[in-house]
Image (cartoon, helix red, strand yellow):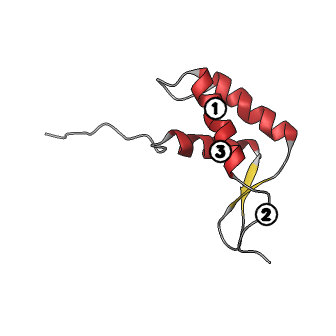
Amino acid sequence: MLMTRERRPAIRTLRGWAMHVLQEAGAIRECEEHGWMQDRADPHARDRAFDIAHNDRPVGISTDEAVAEIREVLDSIGDTCPECP
């Protein structure tokens, strides 16, 4: 008999979801050389990320929690890579 398991979500933490949303919206990018996330300081991309947080948040997470996590991740990421000269 063939048994199947329920598939786990690809993103397991709220922080991981927020980083994924910010990358898709174009608000952050990864340093090509070192892999650090960098804030692109694009207000339109940030607005898109907040729209996603309002409309397409993870199951069981309130709008306020999703928006707060997006804001927290943005506040924790700088606009330069710490390893680049």
**2 over 28 or under it: above or below:** above
- Toward which corner of the image does residue 33 lie, by quadrant? bottom right
Q: Name which of mark 1 and mark 3 comes first in the sequence.
A: 1
**Mark 1 nearby-residue class (10 Å; few <14, some 14–19, many ≥20):** some
- At x 72%, y 66%, the residue is 31
Observer able to see residue 12? yes
Residue contact at pointers 1 and 3, CB within 8 angstroms = no
Q: What residue does disc 1 label?
A: 68
Q: CA distance from mark 2 to mark 1?
A: 23 Å
Q: Position of residue 71 (x, y in %)?
A: 69, 37
Residue 14 position within the rendered picture, expressed as x and y whole percent measured from the top left: 52, 38
Residue to which mark 3 is pinned: 73
> What amino acid type should be assigned to the residue bearing mark 2?
Thr
Q: Which mark is residue 80?
A: 2
**Cα distance between the residues tagged 1 and 3:** 9 Å
Q: Which image quadrant: the C terminus?
A: bottom right
